[in-house]
Image (cartoon, helix red, strand yellow):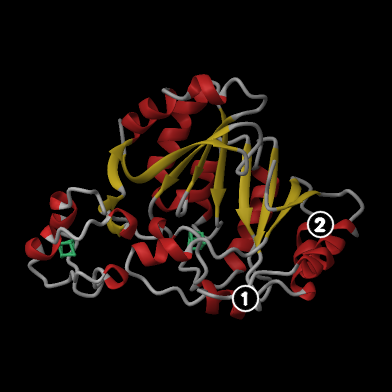
Amino acid sequence: MAVNGMYKLMEQFAVHDGPGMRLIVFLKGCNLRCKWCQNPECIEYKPQLWYNKLRCKDEGQCVEVCSEGAISMDKDNKFDLEKCNDCFKCADVCRPGAFEVIGREISSDDLVKQILKYKFFFSRSKDGGVTISGGEPTFQSEFTADVLSQLKKEGINLAVECNLFSKYEKIWNVVQYCDYLICDIKHMDSDKHKAETGAPNERIHENIKKLNKDFNGKAIAVHIPLIPGWNDDEENIAKTLEFVKPLEKIARIDLLPFNLLPVSKYTAMGMKWEYAGIQGQSQEHLQKLINIVDKYGGRFAHTVGGLW
Ligand code: SF4
Ligand code: SF4
């Protein structure tokens, strides 16, 4: 029986989140609250308002229709998230489409039908396929598992991106269908992990050890998102490598340099981003981190940026 879930969109021709040419499916809902999150529009398990000031023609129907007084004509401070009640009437009346609603409920059967429309493109590239991302796909474990089990029957190469903070049963429910598991190891110090993501890291570390035993797909890849001044020091990267070294199913490490692009997403959602304006890692510093991974003498395939 179909299961309902919360979905944002699909992105074609992706070459980062798994091998070959891939279709990435972004789900909404996450059990962490990483302060640097690159996909803030995927954290909440609900449709959300999105404002694109470049499309706004100053027509003002949105101001008239908003019963909460949440909208102004100031394009740089267009709506007040605190006052907004998610009625989305502004998006209904906005003729140029400056206001949109991000996210909608969809059944697993309907999502599978949509994904299969693109099969001709991803199945032509070697090892191409579908990657389920988010948000956190295991946050809606039943839905994600139903989508993946249907795609598995179609012989599609499957990957999932996972923060590993869910209970193991929820993770395994999803991961059992996948050829590739891509997971984050964000920080080796649990207190620091909690301060910046909202949760300690012990369960994440236990889960990856269990997956190293149980996972029967092709490989596990570890992403390390490099967050300036938090986890991008040589000591933390060295500790991370020592932790994953004995886990033989971990085949690759991707160092992901910090980037400021998400600032426009936070603005579009009426949110402040505390990382706005913070500089990413220099080439020199990245090289020091790459050298740490290189010390493992080919034990891990690795990239800077995550290109497969
Ligand atoms: S969605 Fe929010 S900003 Fe838009 S009309 Fe409703 S209350 Fe006002
Ligand atoms: S786990 Fe990923 S999606 Fe969830 S808040 Fe952190 S960075 Fe964002």
Give the residue number, with chain letter if any, for mark 1. Answer: 190
The answer to whether the beta carbon of the residue marked 2 is less than 8 Å from any atom of ligand 2 is no
In this rendered view, identify the residue nearer to me: 165 or 25.
25
On the image, which quarter does residue 278 sit in? bottom right
Question: Against 308, is 101 above or below?
Answer: below
Image location of residue 48, percent across then percent down: 28, 57
Image location of residue 163, percent across then percent down: 55, 57
Question: Against 85, is 27 above or below?
Answer: above
Q: How many numbered discs?
A: 2
Labelled disc at residue 245: 2
Label whose residue precedes the other's in the sequence (2 or 1): 1
Measuring 63% from the left and 24% from the top, which residue is drawn there? Answer: 125
In this rendered view, identify the residue nearer to me: 230 or 204.
230
Image location of residue 204, percent across then percent down: 59, 62
Left or right for 221, reference 103: right
Task: Label 1, secondary structure: give it.
Answer: helix
* Label pair 2/1, CB-CB below 8 angstroms: no
Measuring 30% from the left and 57% from the top, which residue is drawn there? Answer: 50
Q: Quadrant of the N terminus?
A: top left
Left or right for 73, reference 277: left
Q: Residues within 10 Å of mark 2 (few under 14, many from 20)?
A: some
Left or right for 181, reference 253: left
Task: Label 2, secondary structure: give it.
Answer: loop
The answer to whether the beta carbon of the residue marked 1 is less than 8 Å from any atom of ligand 2 is no
